[in-house]
Amino acid sequence: MNPTLQTDLQSLDTILQTTQAYALSFLNEIETIAPGKSFPERLPDTIPEKGEGFTTALQEFHHTYRDGITAAAGPRYFGFVTGGATPAALAGDWLTSAFDQNSTNSSQSAAAQVEIETIHMLRQLFGLPESFFGTFVSGATMSNFVGLALGRQWVGKQSGINVAQEGVATLPQLKVLSAAIHASAVKSLAMLGMGRNSLLTIPTQPDREAIDLQKLEEALQSLQGTPCIVVANAGTVNTVDFDDIAAIVQLRNRYPFWLHVDAAFGGFVGCTPVYSHLLNGWKEADSITIDAHKWLNVPYDSAMIFTRHKSLQLEVFQNANAKYLGDPEADFNYINYTPENSRRFRALPAWFSLKAYGRDGYRDIVETTISLAQQLGDFIEESEAFTLLAPVRICVVCFTINTPHTENLQKLVNQFLEKLVQHEKVVLTPTVYKGIPAMRAALVNWRTTQKDLEITKSELMQVVSQLLFTSIPA
């Protein structure tokens, strides 16, 4: 064994204690650390010819990179849709690294059984029936990828084609119908060989991001009975709008399509009776995407794909030529159901968090962050400096700056967000809503409290005041 590696092995207890102390120093200060900041580019260092062990590596990391590690998991990072990590999830993630299990089947480890149990608890949390088979994947992109791959396989079978076996080139032109589809689903179309141009974008309802059902039916009619895929959105990224899934399910009685529901974070309203009606009909979906490193508040990277068609998932992802893995139908193994053969033990942080906080804990996280988002929306609507662009349905506030110089609005929004980051208190992300340059705040972090909301409101007003008084339209 390498002498330095041997020394570190003998000092493992000290290394872990040092790491714990270093991590705690960050976590204890997370509310005061900047939630976002730019980090200057630097020339990559070269690999040392002879390593000097963990302590030297930690010192170098601290000196070079620590100042650039932000509180993206903190209470006022409202960019994208980013959760944090609950204490139990963090502990579970540390154990995941310590155990270092390849989560595949139960013949050599309990990891697969933990995943089966975690999926079972998640179905209960979301109110999904046991008929849905579920697996962990790396994020919403791969979850959408799997769901669309299953839809592609289903469409092929309607014409007697096994796409997984014969290739996508054997499939007649496949159309994917959706309204405010997420970029990760479009990316998946490219990766699956279906192509971005297979997407047929359906208009949304007036002043909504929800699909226009009449336009959807007209598009289905135009396909003249050709099977297709419909992607319904259960929580759009700009305004958390929900398609009428139950009505889309009814259309399936007249038109042949695979129904994939992208509920990356909107699916979590299934845990609260106040908002679960927004998911009416989703139990009849063919596949569902739900992201774990959003509202479940477990560390990156983690998501789930649920489907009522387990056999199709096996057809697509089985290791058909790996005889040493046994019969994929007789011997259950997760690697025959996901894109990955080597799989991190992603279920463990979720298992710990679900066990630690239960249904009530997650209901409280969801309802609390929704309430805070709605309060922020009320503040924006009442402010003369901003314009609320859509109702705050769930956890995202979409708004823009109120200015008569609309021709310079994009520049103004960009300047506002840059100055906000420079203040190192709050982070939002830019967007465009109905052609209007805008910004959005997504509240899904378990740490976010009323105090953070007040800080946020103060920061928004300070920055917009500075901007409007100092910016001269070009």
Image: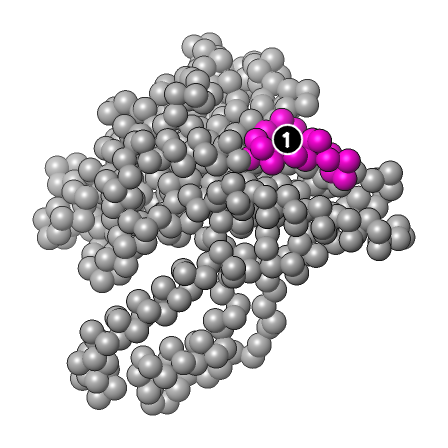
When the figure is inspected, residue 8 is found, relative to residue 110, above or below; the finding is: below
Q: Which residue is mark 1?
A: 378
Range shown magenta: 373-392
Residue at (25, 42) in percent of width and height: 356
When the figure is inspected, residue 49 is found, relative to residue 204, above or below; the finding is: below
Left or right of 106? Residue 40 is right
Q: Is residue 150 visible?
A: no
When the figure is inspected, residue 40 is found, relative to residue 334, above or below; the finding is: below
Residue at (22, 55) in percent of width and height: 102
Give residue 436's quadrant in the image.
top right
Left or right of 6? Residue 383 is right
Left or right of 448? Residue 110 is left
Is residue 141 inside the magenta stretch? no
Residue at (48, 71) in percent of width and height: 66
Q: Out of 424 and 408, give the one closest to the viewer.
A: 424
Where, quadrant-wise, is the N terminus in this rendering? bottom left
- Dot 1: what SS? helix
Residue at (62, 33) in percent of width and height: 377
